[in-house]
Image (cartoon, grey):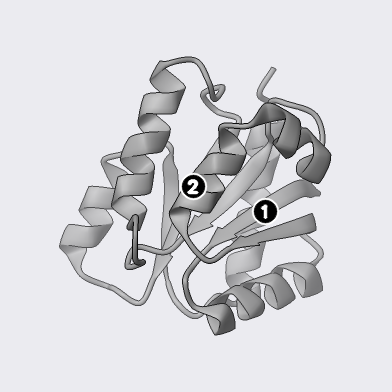
Amino acid sequence: MLNTTIVIDDSEADRYLARRTLKKAGVTHRVLEFPDALSALGLLGDREAFAQQCGPWPPRAVVLLDINMPRMDGFEFLEALDERIKAGDVLPGALAVVMYSTSDFQSDVDRARSHGIVVDYVVKPITVEFAARIARIAESLDAVP
């Protein structure tokens, strides 16, 4: 079972549905919710805060990431996260990002998948079937040293 799932979405209703579905499916112990990408990026940049909320560093977490958000959209978050991985602040393979959005445009899917950390793309709403995919993604994170 996955220790932590991080949901980044400006829609309170979508965050609620994601949390409820993931918990009901039994694929995660903890769901952390962020209404914007900057707040989530802040947590990933603060190892002490992360450890207090999620457990030991490095994180073993799946991030559900919306695309269209104010302040910093999902693609900007991915670029910032890529920089943190290159700088050694985040261990490659310890996080897996799943884009989940209302957009089913192929250009958004292709753009998301161009980031190596993105492992899946799902059109909202989140479903129990999708939660099973999260469980398989979590298994791959367990293999990271």
Note whether 12 is above or below 113 in the view shown: below
* In the foreground, 101 or 38: 38
Residue 116 in sight in this render: no
Residue under the image location 69 percent in, 75 percent down: 21
How would you rate the neighbour count of disc 2 (Cα within 10 Å): few for under 14, some for 14-19, many for 20 or more? many
Residue under the image location 36 percent in, 43 percent down: 78
Tell me the SS state at disc 1.
Answer: strand
Q: Picture coordinates of residue 68 (x, y %)?
A: 32, 68
Note whether 121 is above or below 41 in the view shown: below
Taking the image as shown, residue 99 lies to the left or right of residue 64, namely: left
Note whether 19 is above or below 107 in the view shown: below
- Label 2 sits on residue: 97
Q: Amino acid at mark 2?
A: Val
- Label 1 sits on residue: 5
Q: Amino acid at mark 1?
A: Thr
Residue under the image location 63 percent in, 80 percent down: 17
Q: CA distance from mark 1 to mark 2?
A: 10 Å
Residue under the image location 22 percent in, 50 percent down: 111
Q: Picture coordinates of residue 115 (x, y %)?
A: 32, 38
Q: Mark number for residue 40? A: none
How would you rate the neighbour count of disc 1 (Cα within 10 Å): few for under 14, some for 14-19, many for 20 or more? many
Image quadrant in which the C terminus is located: top right
